[in-house]
Every structure is written in C-alpha cells, then in structure tokens.
Image (cartoon, grey):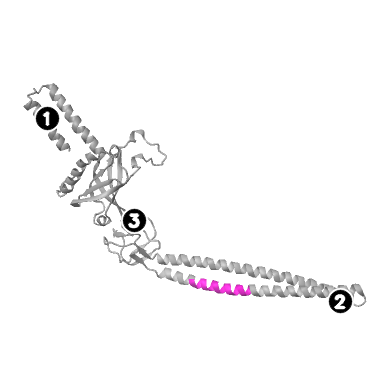
Amino acid sequence: MIAFLTLIYIAAIVIIFKVLKVKPTPWPIAIMVVVGVLMIGTVTVLWTIAAPISTKAVVTRYVVQIVPYSKGQVISIPAKPNVPLKKGDVLYKIDPTPYQLTVDQVKSQLQGAKSNILQLEAGVRVAEANSAKAKADVTAKKAAFDVTVSINKQNPLAISQLKLVEAREQYAASQAAQEQAAAGVEQAQSALTAGQDAVQTVEAQLKSAEFDLDQCTVVAPADGFVTDWQIREGTYVVPMPFAAACSFVETSLTTVVAPLPGQMLVHVKPGQEVEMAFKSRPGQLYLGKVDTVIQATSEGQFTTSGKLPSAASIGSPGILAVVIRFNDDQQVDEIEMGTAGSVAIYTDWGKSLSMISKVTIRMKKWLYFLPVPG
C-alpha cells in the first residue's frame, strides 16, 4: 500500500507540475513535500499499529539441566544426542549396586521389625491373660475374706484371729498382683506401639532407599532431545546443580518470541492471528496466534544490594516481547530452536491496513533465500 501511495504521490506531482504547468516555486514544492510526508507517514504509523511486524523473532523452547538425584558411576547412556525422545525414555543409568544393597538391608530390617511385632502382640495377649487371672483371683480372695469377716462377726470364737489376718493379707496380695498385671498390660501395649512405630520408620527408610535406587535410572522429563552431553560411561556423577550431566531440550512446548516497541502493541491481544517466516525455512509461511505480551522486562528490575540505583543508568528502549504459539503442532517439531525470523500480527483494529503486512511477510519468506542479513 505504501508503494501504491508513493506511485499516486509521484503521479500527482507529474500532473501538477507537468500537465497543469504549475511553476515549481518554493511554495508549491513545500506544499507537495508536506502532503507526501503526511500521506505516507500517516499510513505508515497506522499500519504499524494495525498489523505490527517484527524482524527479530526467535523460536524458543525450555531447556532443562539434567542433574542426577543419586550419585554414582555411569554405566550406560542409551540416549543419543539430538535424537527425539519421549517422556520417560531412559537417558542414562548409574551403577545401582550400593543402592540395591541398601534396599536389601532395609528389607531385612523391616522383616525383623515385623517379626518383633508378632512377639509383642503375643506378649500383650499374655499380659492381658495374666491381668484377667489376677482380677479373678482378687474376686476369689475378696469373697473368702468377706466370708471370714462375716463368720467372725457372728461368732468370734468360730475363726481365730490368725485366720482373719491371713484372709486379709491374701486379699491385699491379690489386689497388688492385679495392679502389677495391669501395669504389665500397659507395658506390653507400649512396647507394641513402639514396635509398630519402628515398623513405620523402617518402611519409610525402605521407600527412601527404593527411591534412591529408582533414581539410578535417569529418564526424560518430557518429550524432547538431549544435547551437550557432559558425561561418558565411567563418569562419576553427583547431585550438584552446577554439575549437570546434559541439557535437555523440551519440544512439548515451542513458542516464538518477538520483540516490538510498546507503541506498536496498543491493539495486540491474545488469540489474534499471526503469520511467520523463518530464515531456516525460506519460502514457507507458518501460522500462529498471540499467546501473551510479557508484562516484564529486565530494564524494570532492580537488583537488591547495598548500593542505591543510579538515576543516570535508569532507562528503557520501550521494547516488549510477544509470545506466539504455532497453530500446527506438527510444524513445530521441524523448526530448530533459536531460529530467527519475522512475524506479522494482525490486530482487530484497522484490518484494511493488514494487507501491507501480508505482502511484507510474504516478501520476507522469499528474501530469506538470499544469504544476507535481515
């Protein structure tokens, strides 16, 4: 459209100065210059707002640093670099021998703790039986003592004082035995509770040991591929963040990030149509939709420190990033991460001006055949 307006503008100049014979004095020339600037400049401004274009778009993916949870010597690396993998595919394996030994040892401890539970449960049953026996003995001794007391009241000469004292002492002894048996039940139950807690503790240790054993097999966290292997068979790996075994590129989510001046994003909203062309795929046009406009830039971030920010260093070029998603998931897999390109966003405002961007983005996809910047 700009080229069309330029042709109209040139034709108007020819008609005015050649056909109508208007003398090219300073005033007519100045007026035509102002008209040209206003006509083409206005269209350009409205165009960039209605259908903004960015020539610095880049394909992005998440990169996960694969750090082992368990330490040990690498014994195999089934995953090949830059070969597509599915979530759960094995990346590499660590020697599981020490972890398997720990699991076996804890299993043995768990078996012993469970066997101890059986003994403690039997001890509780014995203590409860002794308590029941002591209670019955108390009942019998109390009955005998009550009979002795009753007879003694009716006829003091029928039972000697020695028999009365013996009956009282036997009753008191049975009560003490009952209390001891009850304490034995409490002690046995406490021991059983402690044994059950010990079983739970050993079970937790077993789960932890089995988890460590499982971590000897490191798997892909998502669909993607491995790049930048830092290990070989025989390498000793440790669970430290700065000692990653490899970088894993996740392909389950691929987006395009395009930087644009803030004033060009006035009418940009999620869901709007996008056309894209990439340098690594010249001649091809890809479709997508606006996902979001990132509401943050590093220029607006202040690092916490003991030094106050310098007012002279505060500033921003006003560039914001737009995140774009592809419409076709199959097309995503064929585009390399980091590929540069151009995108055209078609807003809901000024749709008649979007034709300029449509023509521009199609020109870009063919110009990418040329080995020149841009």
Q: Amino acid at mark 3?
A: Val
How much space separates mark 1 and mark 2, taking CA atoms?
144 Å
Residue holding disc 1: 12
Q: Position of residue 246 (x, y in %)?
A: 32, 59
Q: Work out whether mark 3 precedes mark 2 in sequence or the reverse, and give the earlier one.
A: 3
Compared to 327, does 33 lie above or below? above
User: Is 112 colored magenta in this rendering?
Assistant: yes
The answer to whether residue 53 is left or right of residue 200 is left
Q: Work out whether mark 1 precedes mark 3 in sequence or the reverse, and give the earlier one.
A: 1
Residue 116 or 351: which is nearer the viewer? 351
Residue holding disc 3: 64
**Disc 1 vs disc 3: which is toward the camera?**
1
Q: Residues within 10 Å of mark 1 (few under 14, many from 20)?
A: some
Q: Amino acid at mark 1?
A: Ala
Element class at badge 1: helix
Q: Work out whether mark 1 precedes mark 2 in sequence or the reverse, and give the earlier one.
A: 1
Q: Which residue corresponds to the image point at 26% horizontal and 43% vertical from the top-left?
A: 346
Q: Residues within 10 Å of mark 3 (few under 14, many from 20)?
A: some
In magenta, the rendered stretch is 107-123
Q: Amino acid at mark 2?
A: Lys
Residue holding disc 2: 163
How much space separates mark 3 and mark 2, taking CA atoms?
91 Å
Element class at badge 3: strand
Residue 230, quarter of picture = bottom left
